[in-house]
Amino acid sequence: MTLSDRKIKTSGEKIPGWSESLPILYVIIAVFLLAYLVPAAVFLRPFGTDVYSHMLYTREMFESNSLSEFYGRIIDEAGDEELGTGYPFGMWMYGSIMAKVVGVQAYDVAYFMPVLLVIIISLVYFALARIFVESKKCALLSVMFLLSMPIVSISLLRYQSSVFVTPVILLILYLNQKEDIRLRKNIPLTALSV
């Protein structure tokens, strides 16, 4: 077999190096659609109980122009200064900023942010799995296993701080385990997680 024959054979692949992993990738896409997108689209309500208080604080922060106005509104509405408004402050701020930038209501953030975070978690988890296993196929199988566990699918669809911080924790694990950290190579993954 000559070099030109090899080029012809490999150039037939749509995505080089992924032809053996395509069935697993299709299963991952099907699991994502059935376990994450369909429940979010069909039920049209957020999952969990703490979600509603997070949505309230995200909406209040969305409607406020400053942090002092946010705290003033919360204290005026509840009449109590000990509301626990410091708990997942970063998630509320991030959610309100996303709502303002994207141009949706703060209530809608509770729907699309968990789905977006599931995609980010899957990509970072795949990168982390590639450190421990050599083949893309095994790394995809680990992502498929993660996404197909019922407890994971139910918990990742919630608008709560544990889901919000999961990509950052996975990125820290990835950077901790990576032997040759090149900043230029890891910038897209870092930007995606943060």
Image (spheres, rainbow, N blue to C red):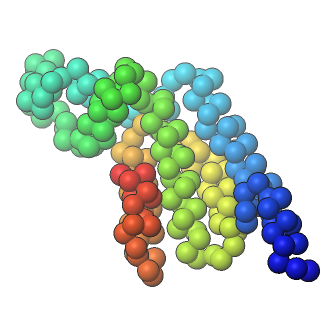
The quadrant where residue 61 appears: top left
Q: Is residue 44 above or below residue 49?
A: above
Where's residue 97, x and y in %?
29, 33
Question: Which residue is most to the right?
Answer: 1
Q: Tell me, yes or no, if residue 24 can be seen here.
A: no
In which quadrant of the rendered image does the N terminus lie? bottom right
User: Is residue 175 among what the camera can see?
Assistant: yes
Q: Residue at x 17, y 33 (%)?
A: 83
Q: Position of residue 48 (x, y in %)?
A: 47, 34
**In the image, 62: left or right of 70?**
right
Of residue 136 and residue 112, the one placed in the foreground of this image is: 136
Classify 29 as above or below 3. Answer: above
The quarter holding residue 2 reads bottom right
Residue 15 or residue 21, whichever sits in front: 15
Q: Is 68 on the left-hand or right-hand side of 11?
A: left
Q: Residue at x 19, y 38 (%)?
A: 84
